[in-house]
Image (spheres, coloured by chain):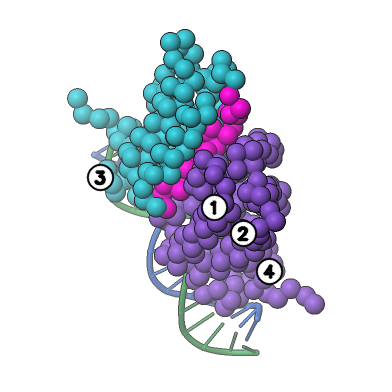
Chain colours: A purple, B cyan, C blue, D green
Amino acid sequence: MPKDRSEQILDFAEREIRKNGFDGVSFRDIADAIGVKSASVHYHFPTKANLGAEVTRRYATRFIEALGSASDPSETSSDRMRRLADGYIEAYKEDTSTCLCAVLGSVVNHLPDETSKEVRGYYAQLQEWVRTALSQSDTALAPNVVVGTLQGAMILALFTDDAAPLIEAKNHIVSLA
Amino acid sequence: MPKDRSEQILDFAEREIRKNGFDGVSFRDIADAIGVKSASVHYHFPTKANLGAEVTRRYATRFIEALGSASDPSETSSDRMRRLADGYIEAYKEDTSTCLCAVLGSVVNHLPDETSKEVRGYYAQLQEWVRTALSQSDTALAPNVVVGTLQGAMILALFTDDAAPLIEAKNHIVSLA
DNA sequence: GTCTATAATTTGATAGAC
DNA sequence: GTCTATCAAATTATAGAC
Protein backbone atom coordinates (compact mmCIF):
# COMPACT_ATOMS: atom_id res chain seq x y z
CA MET A 1 0.00 0.00 0.00
CA PRO A 2 1.21 3.47 -0.87
CA LYS A 3 2.36 5.94 1.73
CA ASP A 4 -0.31 8.38 2.62
CA ARG A 5 0.28 12.04 2.00
CA SER A 6 0.68 13.07 5.62
CA GLU A 7 3.44 10.55 6.01
CA GLN A 8 5.17 11.76 2.86
CA ILE A 9 5.05 15.29 4.19
CA LEU A 10 6.41 14.28 7.58
CA ASP A 11 9.19 12.29 5.93
CA PHE A 12 10.43 15.19 3.88
CA ALA A 13 9.89 17.80 6.58
CA GLU A 14 11.84 15.74 9.09
CA ARG A 15 14.74 15.29 6.72
CA GLU A 16 14.92 18.98 5.92
CA ILE A 17 14.55 20.14 9.50
CA ARG A 18 17.32 17.80 10.56
CA LYS A 19 19.58 19.18 7.86
CA ASN A 20 18.62 22.85 7.80
CA GLY A 21 16.81 23.63 11.01
CA PHE A 22 13.21 24.61 11.63
CA ASP A 23 13.51 27.87 9.70
CA GLY A 24 15.35 26.05 6.95
CA VAL A 25 12.33 24.38 5.41
CA SER A 26 9.19 25.99 3.97
CA PHE A 27 5.75 24.79 2.97
CA ARG A 28 6.71 25.35 -0.63
CA ASP A 29 9.87 23.30 -0.33
CA ILE A 30 7.80 20.45 0.98
CA ALA A 31 5.06 20.86 -1.60
CA ASP A 32 7.53 20.93 -4.50
CA ALA A 33 9.36 17.88 -3.22
CA ILE A 34 6.27 15.69 -3.11
CA GLY A 35 4.58 17.19 -6.14
CA VAL A 36 1.66 19.15 -4.73
CA LYS A 37 0.88 22.78 -3.95
CA SER A 38 1.62 24.43 -0.65
CA ALA A 39 -2.07 24.83 0.11
CA SER A 40 -2.34 21.05 0.16
CA VAL A 41 0.38 20.82 2.75
CA HIS A 42 -1.56 23.28 4.88
CA TYR A 43 -4.59 21.03 4.55
CA HIS A 44 -2.70 18.24 6.33
CA PHE A 45 -0.81 20.44 8.78
CA PRO A 46 -2.57 23.76 9.28
CA THR A 47 0.37 25.67 10.73
CA LYS A 48 4.10 25.31 10.80
CA ALA A 49 4.00 25.05 14.58
CA ASN A 50 1.73 22.04 14.16
CA LEU A 51 3.94 20.49 11.50
CA GLY A 52 6.98 20.90 13.72
CA ALA A 53 5.14 19.32 16.61
CA GLU A 54 4.02 16.33 14.54
CA VAL A 55 7.48 15.79 13.10
CA THR A 56 8.94 15.86 16.58
CA ARG A 57 6.29 13.61 18.08
CA ARG A 58 6.79 10.98 15.39
CA TYR A 59 10.58 11.18 15.68
CA ALA A 60 10.42 10.84 19.46
CA THR A 61 8.09 7.86 19.36
CA ARG A 62 10.21 6.07 16.81
CA PHE A 63 13.45 6.75 18.67
CA ILE A 64 12.21 5.81 22.13
CA GLU A 65 10.47 2.67 20.90
CA ALA A 66 13.61 1.55 19.09
CA LEU A 67 15.50 1.81 22.37
CA GLY A 68 13.40 -0.96 23.87
CA SER A 69 13.38 -1.81 27.53
CA ALA A 70 15.52 0.14 29.98
CA SER A 71 15.05 -2.43 32.73
CA ASP A 72 15.40 -5.89 31.20
CA PRO A 73 17.13 -7.76 34.05
CA SER A 74 19.07 -9.96 31.62
CA GLU A 75 20.97 -6.92 30.36
CA THR A 76 23.79 -4.86 31.84
CA SER A 77 23.89 -1.06 31.86
CA SER A 78 26.59 -1.25 29.24
CA ASP A 79 24.32 -3.25 26.97
CA ARG A 80 21.72 -0.54 27.24
CA MET A 81 24.19 2.27 26.62
CA ARG A 82 25.40 0.41 23.57
CA ARG A 83 21.85 0.28 22.23
CA LEU A 84 21.34 3.96 22.97
CA ALA A 85 24.54 4.95 21.20
CA ASP A 86 23.63 2.76 18.24
CA GLY A 87 20.33 4.62 18.04
CA TYR A 88 22.25 7.86 17.57
CA ILE A 89 24.61 6.29 15.09
CA GLU A 90 21.73 4.99 13.01
CA ALA A 91 20.01 8.36 13.17
CA TYR A 92 23.20 9.92 11.86
CA LYS A 93 23.59 7.40 9.07
CA GLU A 94 19.97 7.69 7.97
CA ASP A 95 20.79 10.79 6.00
CA THR A 96 24.12 12.01 7.37
CA SER A 97 22.02 14.41 9.36
CA THR A 98 21.78 15.28 13.01
CA CYS A 99 19.25 14.00 15.43
CA LEU A 100 16.23 16.26 15.55
CA CYS A 101 17.05 17.13 19.14
CA ALA A 102 20.40 18.74 18.44
CA VAL A 103 18.92 20.95 15.74
CA LEU A 104 15.74 21.95 17.53
CA GLY A 105 17.21 21.80 21.01
CA SER A 106 19.74 24.53 20.43
CA VAL A 107 17.00 27.01 19.49
CA VAL A 108 14.21 25.61 21.65
CA ASN A 109 13.23 29.01 23.02
CA HIS A 110 12.81 30.36 19.51
CA LEU A 111 10.39 27.64 18.36
CA PRO A 112 6.62 28.11 18.38
CA ASP A 113 5.16 26.87 21.66
CA GLU A 114 3.33 23.95 20.09
CA THR A 115 6.60 22.66 18.65
CA SER A 116 8.89 23.35 21.59
CA LYS A 117 6.49 21.54 23.89
CA GLU A 118 7.07 18.34 21.93
CA VAL A 119 10.83 18.85 21.88
CA ARG A 120 10.86 19.18 25.64
CA GLY A 121 8.69 16.12 25.98
CA TYR A 122 11.09 14.11 23.90
CA TYR A 123 14.03 15.12 26.07
CA ALA A 124 12.13 14.20 29.21
CA GLN A 125 11.43 10.72 27.82
CA LEU A 126 15.03 10.22 26.78
CA GLN A 127 16.35 11.39 30.13
CA GLU A 128 13.98 9.06 31.94
CA TRP A 129 15.02 6.10 29.80
CA VAL A 130 18.69 6.70 30.57
CA ARG A 131 18.03 7.23 34.26
CA THR A 132 16.22 3.88 34.44
CA ALA A 133 18.83 2.17 32.28
CA LEU A 134 21.59 3.18 34.70
CA SER A 135 19.64 2.83 37.93
CA GLN A 136 21.03 -0.58 38.90
CA SER A 137 24.61 0.35 38.13
CA ASP A 138 26.90 2.21 40.47
CA THR A 139 28.40 4.15 37.58
CA ALA A 140 29.45 7.75 38.05
CA LEU A 141 27.80 8.56 34.72
CA ALA A 142 24.98 11.07 35.11
CA PRO A 143 22.07 10.75 32.64
CA ASN A 144 22.73 14.33 31.57
CA VAL A 145 26.29 13.47 30.71
CA VAL A 146 25.26 10.46 28.66
CA VAL A 147 22.72 12.34 26.59
CA GLY A 148 24.91 15.40 26.26
CA THR A 149 27.90 13.40 25.12
CA LEU A 150 25.98 11.68 22.35
CA GLN A 151 24.23 14.86 21.34
CA GLY A 152 27.47 16.76 21.11
CA ALA A 153 29.15 13.96 19.21
CA MET A 154 26.36 14.16 16.63
CA ILE A 155 27.29 17.74 15.85
CA LEU A 156 30.96 16.89 15.58
CA ALA A 157 30.12 14.04 13.22
CA LEU A 158 28.49 16.56 10.90
CA PHE A 159 31.70 18.55 10.65
CA THR A 160 34.03 15.73 9.80
CA ASP A 161 31.29 14.12 7.71
CA ASP A 162 32.27 10.96 9.54
CA ALA A 163 30.69 8.89 12.31
CA ALA A 164 34.02 8.65 14.18
CA PRO A 165 33.11 11.11 16.97
CA LEU A 166 29.96 9.10 17.61
CA ILE A 167 31.91 5.86 17.82
CA GLU A 168 34.29 7.46 20.31
CA ALA A 169 31.38 8.72 22.38
CA LYS A 170 29.83 5.27 22.30
CA ASN A 171 32.99 3.57 23.51
CA HIS A 172 33.39 6.18 26.21
CA ILE A 173 29.90 5.71 27.58
CA VAL A 174 29.74 1.95 27.25
CA SER A 175 33.02 1.53 29.07
CA LEU A 176 31.89 3.73 31.96
CA ALA A 177 28.34 2.41 32.34
CA MET B 1 34.99 56.01 24.33
CA PRO B 2 31.74 54.87 22.79
CA LYS B 3 31.39 51.55 21.09
CA ASP B 4 31.62 51.83 17.38
CA ARG B 5 28.71 50.83 15.24
CA SER B 6 30.22 47.65 13.84
CA GLU B 7 30.78 46.40 17.35
CA GLN B 8 27.23 47.25 18.37
CA ILE B 9 25.94 45.31 15.38
CA LEU B 10 28.13 42.32 16.14
CA ASP B 11 27.04 42.37 19.78
CA PHE B 12 23.38 42.22 18.98
CA ALA B 13 23.74 39.83 16.06
CA GLU B 14 25.74 37.41 18.17
CA ARG B 15 23.20 37.46 20.95
CA GLU B 16 20.32 36.83 18.59
CA ILE B 17 22.07 34.12 16.61
CA ARG B 18 22.94 32.31 19.80
CA LYS B 19 19.33 32.46 20.93
CA ASN B 20 17.46 32.01 17.68
CA GLY B 21 19.84 30.59 15.15
CA PHE B 22 21.27 32.08 11.98
CA ASP B 23 17.88 32.32 10.29
CA GLY B 24 16.39 33.72 13.47
CA VAL B 25 17.80 37.20 13.12
CA SER B 26 17.33 39.70 10.30
CA PHE B 27 18.99 42.92 9.23
CA ARG B 28 15.86 44.77 10.31
CA ASP B 29 15.89 43.19 13.76
CA ILE B 30 19.43 44.39 14.20
CA ALA B 31 18.76 47.84 12.80
CA ASP B 32 15.74 48.38 15.04
CA ALA B 33 17.62 47.22 18.11
CA ILE B 34 20.43 49.70 17.70
CA GLY B 35 18.31 52.52 16.28
CA VAL B 36 19.39 52.74 12.65
CA LYS B 37 17.97 51.58 9.32
CA SER B 38 18.73 48.24 7.74
CA ALA B 39 20.64 49.89 4.90
CA SER B 40 23.14 51.11 7.48
CA VAL B 41 23.69 47.60 8.73
CA HIS B 42 24.40 46.55 5.16
CA TYR B 43 26.95 49.34 4.95
CA HIS B 44 28.99 47.70 7.73
CA PHE B 45 28.34 44.09 6.73
CA PRO B 46 27.40 43.85 3.07
CA THR B 47 25.84 40.41 3.20
CA LYS B 48 24.40 38.14 5.84
CA ALA B 49 27.04 35.54 5.02
CA ASN B 50 29.65 38.14 5.85
CA LEU B 51 27.91 39.17 9.06
CA GLY B 52 27.70 35.53 10.16
CA ALA B 53 31.37 35.06 9.39
CA GLU B 54 32.41 38.15 11.36
CA VAL B 55 30.26 37.20 14.34
CA THR B 56 31.80 33.75 14.35
CA ARG B 57 35.34 34.97 13.92
CA ARG B 58 35.01 37.39 16.81
CA TYR B 59 33.38 34.77 19.01
CA ALA B 60 36.08 32.22 18.21
CA THR B 61 38.92 34.64 18.89
CA ARG B 62 37.44 35.69 22.21
CA PHE B 63 36.75 32.13 23.31
CA ILE B 64 40.11 30.67 22.34
CA GLU B 65 42.05 33.57 23.81
CA ALA B 66 40.18 33.26 27.08
CA LEU B 67 41.28 29.63 27.27
CA GLY B 68 44.89 30.67 27.53
CA SER B 69 47.78 28.28 27.24
CA ALA B 70 47.18 24.60 26.56
CA SER B 71 50.73 23.66 27.43
CA ASP B 72 51.76 25.56 30.56
CA PRO B 73 53.95 22.96 32.30
CA SER B 74 52.90 24.16 35.76
CA GLU B 75 49.34 23.01 35.09
CA THR B 76 47.74 19.58 35.02
CA SER B 77 45.36 18.37 32.33
CA SER B 78 42.56 18.64 34.86
CA ASP B 79 43.38 22.30 35.43
CA ARG B 80 43.05 22.92 31.73
CA MET B 81 39.80 21.01 31.44
CA ARG B 82 38.45 23.03 34.32
CA ARG B 83 39.26 26.23 32.48
CA LEU B 84 37.70 24.93 29.30
CA ALA B 85 34.50 23.93 31.08
CA ASP B 86 34.36 27.29 32.82
CA GLY B 87 34.57 28.94 29.43
CA TYR B 88 31.40 27.12 28.41
CA ILE B 89 29.70 27.91 31.69
CA GLU B 90 30.49 31.60 31.32
CA ALA B 91 29.27 31.55 27.73
CA TYR B 92 26.03 30.05 28.96
CA LYS B 93 25.62 32.57 31.74
CA GLU B 94 26.38 35.54 29.49
CA ASP B 95 22.82 35.55 28.27
CA THR B 96 21.45 32.11 29.17
CA SER B 97 22.16 31.27 25.58
CA THR B 98 24.07 28.52 23.88
CA CYS B 99 27.57 28.71 22.58
CA LEU B 100 27.61 29.83 18.99
CA CYS B 101 29.00 26.47 17.97
CA ALA B 102 26.04 24.41 19.12
CA VAL B 103 23.60 26.64 17.26
CA LEU B 104 25.56 27.01 14.04
CA GLY B 105 27.21 23.62 14.23
CA SER B 106 24.00 21.66 14.00
CA VAL B 107 23.11 23.30 10.68
CA VAL B 108 26.61 23.87 9.38
CA ASN B 109 25.83 22.48 5.94
CA HIS B 110 22.94 24.90 5.57
CA LEU B 111 24.97 28.03 6.28
CA PRO B 112 26.41 30.23 3.52
CA ASP B 113 29.94 29.14 2.67
CA GLU B 114 31.55 32.28 3.99
CA THR B 115 29.96 31.67 7.39
CA SER B 116 30.39 27.91 7.62
CA LYS B 117 34.06 28.27 6.82
CA GLU B 118 34.53 30.30 10.01
CA VAL B 119 32.49 27.84 12.06
CA ARG B 120 34.67 24.98 10.88
CA GLY B 121 37.78 26.99 11.62
CA TYR B 122 36.60 27.61 15.14
CA TYR B 123 36.04 23.92 15.74
CA ALA B 124 39.46 23.09 14.42
CA GLN B 125 41.08 25.56 16.84
CA LEU B 126 39.09 24.22 19.76
CA GLN B 127 39.91 20.64 18.91
CA GLU B 128 43.57 21.49 18.63
CA TRP B 129 43.59 23.27 21.99
CA VAL B 130 42.04 20.24 23.69
CA ARG B 131 44.39 17.83 21.96
CA THR B 132 47.39 19.81 23.18
CA ALA B 133 45.91 20.25 26.64
CA LEU B 134 45.57 16.49 27.07
CA SER B 135 48.73 15.47 25.27
CA GLN B 136 50.84 14.89 28.36
CA SER B 137 48.17 12.96 30.18
CA ASP B 138 47.48 9.27 29.71
CA THR B 139 43.75 9.87 29.99
CA ALA B 140 41.34 7.82 27.94
CA LEU B 141 39.45 11.02 27.12
CA ALA B 142 39.41 11.76 23.41
CA PRO B 143 39.33 15.44 22.40
CA ASN B 144 36.13 14.75 20.49
CA VAL B 145 34.50 13.42 23.61
CA VAL B 146 35.53 16.44 25.66
CA VAL B 147 34.18 18.96 23.18
CA GLY B 148 31.08 16.93 22.46
CA THR B 149 30.24 16.49 26.10
CA LEU B 150 30.41 20.21 26.83
CA GLN B 151 28.57 21.08 23.66
CA GLY B 152 25.78 18.66 24.40
CA ALA B 153 25.55 19.83 28.01
CA MET B 154 25.03 23.37 26.72
CA ILE B 155 21.88 22.32 24.91
CA LEU B 156 20.58 20.46 27.94
CA ALA B 157 21.22 23.55 30.07
CA LEU B 158 18.91 25.50 27.77
CA PHE B 159 16.05 23.10 28.45
CA THR B 160 16.23 23.08 32.19
CA ASP B 161 17.13 26.78 32.14
CA ASP B 162 19.80 25.78 34.60
CA ALA B 163 23.57 25.37 34.39
CA ALA B 164 23.42 22.03 36.22
CA PRO B 165 24.10 19.83 33.16
CA LEU B 166 27.19 21.93 32.44
CA ILE B 167 28.43 21.52 35.99
CA GLU B 168 27.97 17.77 35.72
CA ALA B 169 29.82 17.71 32.42
CA LYS B 170 32.62 19.76 33.94
CA ASN B 171 33.01 17.40 36.91
CA HIS B 172 32.96 14.43 34.59
CA ILE B 173 35.68 15.74 32.33
CA VAL B 174 37.88 17.20 35.04
CA SER B 175 37.83 13.96 36.99
CA LEU B 176 38.83 11.92 33.95
CA ALA B 177 41.49 14.23 32.52
C1' DG C 1 -7.83 16.40 -1.07
C1' DT C 2 -6.08 19.36 -4.24
C1' DC C 3 -6.22 23.33 -6.81
C1' DT C 4 -5.91 28.69 -8.11
C1' DA C 5 -5.44 32.94 -6.41
C1' DT C 6 -4.15 36.02 -3.26
C1' DA C 7 -3.31 38.48 1.03
C1' DA C 8 -0.08 40.28 4.37
C1' DT C 9 4.39 40.24 5.97
C1' DT C 10 9.25 39.62 5.99
C1' DT C 11 13.48 38.88 3.92
C1' DG C 12 18.25 40.19 1.91
C1' DA C 13 19.89 43.57 -0.84
C1' DT C 14 20.73 48.00 -3.81
C1' DA C 15 20.59 52.96 -5.77
C1' DG C 16 21.21 57.39 -4.84
C1' DA C 17 20.49 61.67 -1.94
C1' DC C 18 22.40 63.99 2.08
C1' DG D 1 27.73 56.77 7.63
C1' DT D 2 23.09 57.13 7.48
C1' DC D 3 19.04 57.99 5.23
C1' DT D 4 14.69 57.24 1.92
C1' DA D 5 12.88 54.52 -1.27
C1' DT D 6 12.43 50.53 -3.39
C1' DC D 7 12.96 45.85 -5.33
C1' DA D 8 12.39 40.98 -6.10
C1' DA D 9 11.73 37.06 -3.82
C1' DA D 10 10.09 34.19 -0.21
C1' DT D 11 7.26 33.34 3.77
C1' DT D 12 2.94 31.59 6.40
C1' DA D 13 -1.61 31.38 5.76
C1' DT D 14 -6.57 31.64 3.93
C1' DA D 15 -10.85 31.71 0.75
C1' DG D 16 -13.25 29.38 -2.38
C1' DA D 17 -13.71 26.52 -6.74
C1' DC D 18 -13.35 21.77 -8.35
Q: Is circle 4 on the same chain as circle 3? A: no
Q: Residues within 10 Å of mark 1 (few under 14, many from 20)?
A: some
Q: Chain of mark 3?
A: B
Residue A135 is marked as 1
Q: Is circle 1 on the same chain as circle 2? A: yes
Tell me the CA gap for discs 1 and 3. Answer: 54 Å
Q: Is residue A155 visible?
A: no
Image coordinates of residue A55 in percent, x first then y, are 58, 65
Q: Residues within 10 Å of mark 2 (few under 14, many from 20)?
A: some
Quadrant in the picture for the C terminus of chain A: top right
For disc 4, the marked residue is A8
Residue A71 is marked as 2
Q: Residues within 10 Å of mark 3 (few under 14, many from 20)?
A: few
Residue furthest out toward the right: A1
**Element type where label 1 sits in the image:** loop
First in sequence: mark 1 vs mark 4? 4
Image coordinates of residue B43 in percent, x first then y, are 37, 36
First in sequence: mark 2 vs mark 4? 4
**Element type where label 2 sits in the image:** loop
Residue type beneath disc 1: Ser
First in sequence: mark 1 vs mark 2? 2
Residue furthest out toward the left: B1
* Vertical comparison of B38 with B66: above or below: below
Kindly indicate the quadrant of the structure image that contains residue D17.
Answer: bottom right
Residue B35 is marked as 3
Q: Are marks 2 and 4 in contact (CB under 8 Å)?
A: no
Q: Are marks 1 and 2 in contact (CB under 8 Å)?
A: yes
Between D3 and A114, the one lying in front of the other is: A114
Image coordinates of residue B149 in percent, x first then y, are 52, 38
Q: Is circle 1 on the same chain as circle 4? A: yes
